[in-house]
Image (spheres, rainbow, N blue to C red):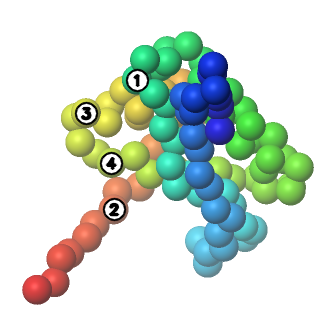
């Protein structure tokens, strides 16, 4: 969490997960939100750096995040790619009646 003048301006929620896809556990970013008024000021980068530090402290080698494939998510995709994340998957879903 990042605060400014006693208000929250950025938040990241994460969970450690295990999967048959990877030899070891990994951190999944469940949420990463920066108040729109503070975007472009390094708040998101600070949150990612804190997550990376936490992963290193626990000897975790992989961080994952999902970020939708809608046009309005393109700035988020660029944000993650600029920080060294690579696009690797596409998801599918099906709603049942």
Q: CA distance from mark 3 to mark 2?
A: 17 Å
Q: Which of disc 4 and disc 1 is earlier in sequence?
A: 1
Residue 55 x/y as whole percent: 78, 50
In which image quadrant can residue 4 be found? top right
**Which tag is nearer the camera, tag 4 or tag 2?**
4
Q: Quadrant of the C terminus?
A: bottom left
Instruction: Specify whether residue 6 is in view.
Output: yes
- Using the image, determine if residue 18 lies above or below residue 5: below
Of pointers 1 and 2, the one earlier in the residue sequence: 1
Q: Secondary structure at mark 1?
A: helix
Q: Is residue 30 left or right of residue 92?
A: right
**Relative side of 28 to 96, left or right:** right
Q: Which mark is residue 68?
A: 4
| Element under disc 4 | loop
Q: Residue at x 66, y 73 (%)?
A: 18
Q: Position of residue 94 (x, y in %)?
A: 20, 75
Q: Secondary structure at mark 2?
A: loop
Q: Residue at x 33, y 48 (%)?
A: 68
Q: Which residue is denoted by mark 1 in the rendering?
A: 36
Residue furthest to the front in view is 6
Real-space Cα distance between discs 3 and 1? 14 Å
Q: Nearer the viewer, residue 22 or 95?
A: 95
Compute the Cα span from label 1 to label 2.
27 Å
Q: Which mark is residue 72?
A: 3
Which residue is under mark 2? 91
The CA distance from mark 4 to mark 2 is 9 Å
The answer to whether mark 1 and mark 2 are in CB contact below 8 A is no
Q: Residue furthest bottom?
A: 97
Mark 1 or 4: the one toward you: 1
Disc with the residue nearer the chain's start (3 vs 2):
3
The answer to whether the residues at label 3 and label 1 have Cβ atoms under 8 Å apart is no
């Amino acid at each position: 969490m990042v605060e400014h003048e006693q208000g929250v301006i950025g938040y990241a929620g994460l969970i450690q997960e295990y999967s048959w896809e990877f030899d070891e556990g990994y951190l999944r970013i469940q949420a990463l939100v920066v108040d729109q008024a503070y975007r472009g000021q390094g708040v998101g980068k600070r949150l990612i750096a804190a997550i990376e530090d936490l992963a290193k402290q626990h000897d975790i080698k992989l961080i994952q995040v999902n970020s939708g494939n809608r046009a309005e998510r393109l700035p988020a995709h660029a944000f993650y790619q600029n920080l060294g994340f690579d696009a690797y998957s596409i998801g599918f879903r099906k709603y049942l009646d």
